[in-house]
Image (cartoon, rainbow, N blue to C red):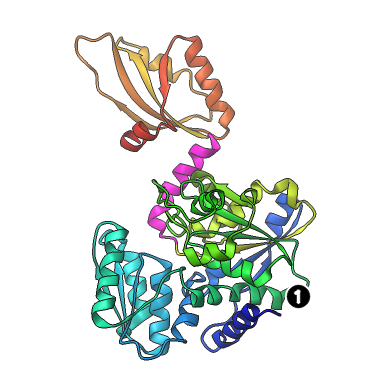
Amino acid sequence: MSEFQDKARAAMHAMREVFPATPLMRNDHLSAKYDADIWLKREDLSPVRSYKLRGAFNAMRKVEGASAFVCASAGNHAQGMAFMCRHFQVPGVIFMPVTTPQQKIDKTRIFGGEYVSIKLVGDYFDDTLAEAQRHCTEIGGHFLAPFDDDDVIEGQASVGAEIEEDLPELADMIVLPVGGGGLSSGMRSYFGDRVALRFVEPSGGMSLRAAVEAGEPVTLKKVDSFVDGAAVARIGAKPFARLKGIRAEDVLAAPEDRICITMLEMLNVEGIVLEPAGALSVNALEDLRDEIRGKRVICVTSGGNFDFERLPEVKERAQRFAGVKKYFILRLPQRPGALRDFLDMLGPDDDISRFEYLKKSARNFGSVLIGIETKDAANLDALYARMEADGFAYRDITTDPVLAEFLI
């Protein structure tokens, strides 16, 4: 056993004084769906509903004499550090962007109690981070990085140590979500070549893939923030040093809208609440279907901190990705009966979910914004065919990034 494995296992045993191991559970639904033996490592069932308290615990237990711990985070890292500040009874200062949802602020405050103070600074995370680091230097505190820290990486590797303890024969493959790289690099350092690893990033934030292709960490020019727990513009330097050498084809892209389908499926079928980042590994099974058939696969569900106020957005994005909801602008003749002609083209399962029309004077045609929901994507293809046959001009804006953002 390597020195890193020894340290990860030591961290795991030390954690048992604070919280129990998260369960490794076979999932019958996913196993049947993919004709494989699918297990879930349920990090969403930790005391803070993510694996982040592991790295915080391991790093904080090794620090002596700090006046306070400081971090910048709008999510799981903040909650993990807050939980451990209360456990170790040490002060912590957590900087969050002003735009952080109140639910996350309240939860962090609950976990930290009297040991944590929260400061809301900046509209963007870069501003929040800069102020947190300035404050940390000013008070002589210890800055707790979310992933670019060897002790944090070592703590996250305890996920692997628990998997091995529960399943000594291991699996054919472990599928891991990737954000800054703390969890994935820790797991690779722990398992080495003993098990195949696949790394999953959101399509709008593939910093690991970019680093693998460049041979070093690079900063993405643009990041889609929907998968907020994994949408990182630059992979950590220390995590990438441990991940360097992996194959680009082993880094998978999960489309943000497809992730929404997985979140709804796990909620409706299994009663499992996953945040977008927590659903990454399960979502990637669709791309791995042929490779995993008949094999044992472990998916790490990394977090379940989901604000249900986002559920309508998740449902909307899932429907659009599945093709059962479309938005289009219809060029409607301004004559009596024109709207009835259009309505007559709708099928029995087609439902109007959005309709905006303002009649224009002195014009022959008016524009109508229409949203249609249906049960089968083929129904909307058939509707479009009937509209074209009857001479109705329209423009599908469902996936138009500009129009969809402002009109839908």
Which of 151 and 105 lies nearest the eye of the viewer? Answer: 151
Which of 348 and 355 lies nearest the eye of the viewer? Answer: 355
Classify 160 as above or below 310: below
Expressed as whole percent of the image width and height from the top left, the position of residue 324 reads 52, 35
Which of 7 and 32 lies nearest the eye of the viewer? Answer: 7
Expressed as whole percent of the image width and height from the top left, the position of residue 19 reads 53, 83
Which of 28 and 12 lies nearest the eye of the viewer? Answer: 12
Q: Amino acid at mark 1?
A: Pro
Quarter of the rendering occupied by the C terminus: top left
Quarter of the rendering occupied by the N terminus: bottom right
Is residue 187 inside the magenta stretch?
no
Find disc 1 in the rendering and name its residue: 168
Expressed as whole percent of the image width and height from the top left, the position of residue 160 reads 64, 72
Q: In the rendered image, which quarter is residue 154 located in?
A: bottom right
- Which residues fall within the magenta stretch? 306-323
Classify 100 as above or below 316: below
* Residue that appears at 59% across and 60% down: 244
Q: Is residue 342 visible?
A: yes
Classify 83 as above or below 373: below
Dominant secondary structure of the residues highlighted in magenta in the image: helix
Is residue 312 inside the magenta stretch?
yes
Expressed as whole percent of the image width and height from the top left, the position of residue 249 reads 64, 48
Which residue ends up furthest to the left in the rendered image?
A: 361
Q: Is residue 302 visible?
A: no
* Residue that appears at 59% across and 68% down: 42
